[in-house]
Amino acid sequence: MKIGLIGYPLGHSWSKEIHAFLLGEDCYTLHECRPEDLETFFRTTDLDGFNVTIPHKQAVIPLLDVIDPAAERIGAVNTVVRRDGKFIGYNTDYEGFIRMLEANGIQIRGRRAAILGSGGVSKAIRAAVGVMEGTYDIVSRRASEDTITYEQMYANESAYSVVINATPVGMSPKEEESPADLTRFSNLEAVVDAIANPLRTALCFQAQELGIPFCGGFEMLVRQAIAADRWFTGHPMDEALAVPCMNHLLKQRRSIVLIGMPTSGKSTIAEQIHAQTGRALVEMDEILTERLGMPISQCFAEKGEAFFRAAESELCKELTSGNAVISCGGGVVKNRNNMQYLSRNGLVFWIDRDPSLLYGSASRPLSQSKEDILRLYEVRKDLYRRYSDIRIENNGSPEEAVRKILRFTGESES
């Protein structure tokens, strides 16, 4: 079987690795195809089937011999199978979106959603919201018979329980962008972003800051791939493959980020995770000490905290790619941009040690005494809570904390 993905531009796609895991064979290839070359691709391809991504999900429809009734109702195709010389189009984005929301406990029934964007992904999401007994408005930059503007959405913000991003705004390499400002909504229950790269978009990061449940497009990508492989192979696919597939890929592409107070055990835990998983070990304070050419306490004394924090932020910006274990300095959470960089492709663990077990150190400029560290804990604990995905209580052995972390990442069952 020869299958693949067409789109333009493709950038860094997860699809090849996803389908290799699900099918157990390396039969998936990537094909960048410009819009003007789409007809030629259909005439010349030797693929047995292929997935379709931006900007072709609607453009492929006239080139198909047969279109599945569900895909025809949606008005977009993301999966094409060649059978007996005929191209047949399906839509599995629709199913992947529903399965993702179900897995994350996000309720649509009886809610109104603001669906940002009007393209092919938006069409699939609209159909899914309808099946899940929700209602929606389509939000676009220009109003039309079927859409409202962003200004109209904000003017009616209290009507929306869910915001769903079906635009490419926020996708790598423009990760700093966000399609909406969530602070302008008063009744949000959930935020969903169809973007898979980065793992946590700026929109999802803001949702986390505000305490709003969210999920991102990577899971949707995996779950729609299971449905696509059902069409490619002609055989049932096990939905239970979704979680092990995600864990397998995230181990390669997602960092483990450790935040918490000085002396909470971050460095020891990071070293053990490095030893057990082979992830690159990043000790931020060690790197900064080397770059600054002096101990951190000396930098504070001679150049001031602001100088140090600027260097710290520059390092955070460099650490947005995955597959490392990153032990952060205790004050990294003071700058939200730091945490946005680190969590973009990272899972953030708060290593929380009981304050009575923490201790001061002359080498740490802001926590030299027990009183200093207790005061800092009170100041920072809400920031650690806000920016962490998971809190790990570390009042026992570091080995126990490591086991908890690796269970969360799916890299250990014990």
Image: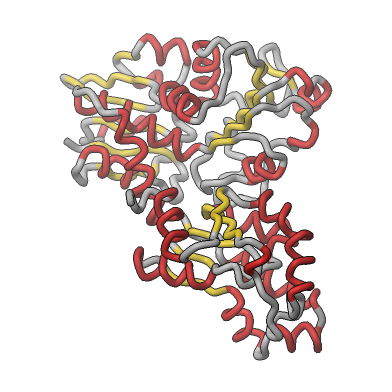
The quarter holding residue 155 reads top right
Query: From this viewpoint, is residue 60 visible?
Result: no
Relative placement, left or right, of 133 versus 374 is left
Q: Quadrant of residue 134?
A: top right
**Picture residue at 67% right of the left edge, 88% below the top:** 295
Residue 72 point in image, percent of width and height: 42, 12
Comparing 242 with 176, the one in front is 242
| Relative horizontal placement of residue 162, taking residue 324 as reference (left or right) | right
Percent of width and height locating residue 108:
58, 18
From this view, report whether residue 252 is shown above or below residue 167. Answer: below
Position above or below: 193 against 385: above
Task: Examine the rendering and report whether any part of residue 41 can be seen.
Answer: yes
- Residue 309 image offset from top left, x and y in percent: 74, 72
Q: Quadrant of residue 343?
A: bottom right
Q: Is residue 111 left or right of residue 40?
A: right
Residue 300, image x and y in percent? 78, 82
Q: Quadrant of the N terminus?
A: top left
Rendered position, 128 above or below 225: above
The residue located at (62%, 66%) in the rendering is: 316
Of all residues, the one furthest to the front in this rendering is 356
Q: Nearer the viewer, residue 320 or 100?
A: 100
Compared to residue 53, the image places residue 388 above or below, namely below
Residue for point 45% across, 50% down: 11
